[in-house]
Amino acid sequence: MTSNQQRVVVKVGSSSLTSLHGEISSKKLEKLVEQIVRLKDEGHEVLLVSSGAVAAGYRKLGFINRPDTLPEKQASASVGQGLLIEAYSKLFLSHGYIASQILITKSDFSDEKRYNNVRNTMNVLLKRGIIPIINENDTVTVNRLKFGDNDTLSAKVAGLIDADLLTILSDIDGLYDANPRKAPDAALVREVNEITPEIEASAGDAGSEIGTGGMKSKLDAFKITMASGIKGFLGRADTSGLLHEAISGTARGTYFIPNADSHTLNHKEQWIAFNSGPEGDIVVHNESKEFIIDHKKSLYPSSIYEINGRFSNGSVVRILDQEGEEIGLGVVNFSSSQLRKWKKDTNQETAASSQAVVDREAFVCHLELSVPL
C-alpha cells in the first residue's frame, strides 16, 4: 500500500442492515457493499465486522419477535449467518471482489497462540485482496465467553491487524454532548482526544431495539483503539459516501484521535490488556507500587505481599495494591506454587530476589491506560 492507502476496519450494526421487520434489507446491504467496493477500488484494504446474524435468522425459524433465550438466539444465528454471508459474497463478486468469513469466539483471543494465528490469517487475506467478514460465533458462544458486542470485537480486531482506522457505522451520526433523543439542543462532538467520565456520562445508553450495542459500548471500543494508537470514526450508516469521507477526514460524525503523547500498546500489550483473562492475583506492598508505575520497574519477589489463586508460569495475573486497587496486568515468570514457596522460605526468596516475577515488558499498567481492563 502507498502512504495514501489505509487498512480500514468497518463495523456495521444490526439496525443498519435489517428492515423494520428484522430481515436482511437488500437495499441497505447493497449500499454498504458499494461503499466498501469504492474503498477497494481506491486501493484500501478493508475488513468488515458485521452484525445481523440473529436479526436475519429469527424470522426464518418462525419467530415473530427477536427471541430472548440463548438456544433460540443461537439457532437464529445459525440460520442468519449463512444468509448474511451468502448475500455479501454475491454482492462483492458482482463487483469483482471475493469475501471470506471468519467466525470468532472470545476464547480465540484469550489464547495467545490462537490470537496470533488469527492475525496471521487476516493479514494473508488482506494482502491477497480478499475482504474478510468477521462476526462472533454466536451459534456456540456462551454468555461468559462473549465479547459482549461487535463494537468491542471490531476494536480488538483493529488492534490485531494494525489498522489505520476503525469506522463504526450506526443509526446515529456521531457522539453528542447529550442524548439527542432526549435533548433536542444536543450538539454533535466532532473530535475526541480523550474519553473522559464526563463524556461517558453525557453519552447515555442509546441503542436500537434490534442491535445490542449502545453508545457506551462504542465508547469502550474507541478506548481500545485509542490506547492502541488507532484512529476511530463514528457516523450514521445511511449517509451517502460516508466511508470515503471518513477516510479523507471530511465526514459528518465524530473522530476519535489518539493523543500523540500517550503510550501506544504493542501487540503483546494489547493481548495482555484486552484479551488474556487473568488467572490470579499478586498483591504488592504499597511502597512497591510507585516503583512499578512511576519508575517502570519489573516486579520482584521482595515486593509481593500476597498471592491469590492458582496459576502457572506464563499466565496473566492482576497486580493489586494492598487496598485491592488494580495496578495492571502482567505475565508471570513463575507459578503460584513457586511464589508461595518463596514466601515461606526466606532463604529461597533471597536467592530468587534477582529474578523478576513479572518483567516490565510483560506488564500493562491500568492507571497508565485509563481503559477498563
Image: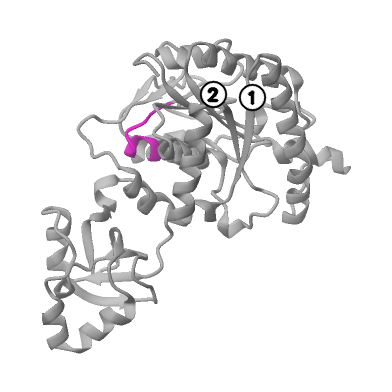
Q: Which residues are magenta?
A: 224-232
Given the current orientation, which residue lies at the most extreme right position?
Answer: 62
What's the residue type where badge 1 is placed? Ile
Marks 2/1 in contact by CB < 8 Å: the verdict is yes
Q: CA distance from mark 2 to mark 1?
A: 8 Å
Label 1 SS: loop
Q: Does residue 121 lie above or below 141 as drawn?
A: above
**Which color mode does the image show?**
one colour
Instruction: Report x, y in % for residue 129.
Output: 54, 23
What's the residue type where badge 2 is placed? Gly
Instruction: Report x, y in % for residue 39.
Output: 52, 15
Residue with the mark numbered 1: 98
Label 2 SS: loop
Q: Does residue 347 lie above or below 316 as drawn?
A: below
Residue with the mark numbered 2: 129
Question: Which mark is drawn over residue 245?
Answer: none
Instruction: Report x, y in % for residue 154.
Output: 50, 37
Magenta run includes residue 228: yes
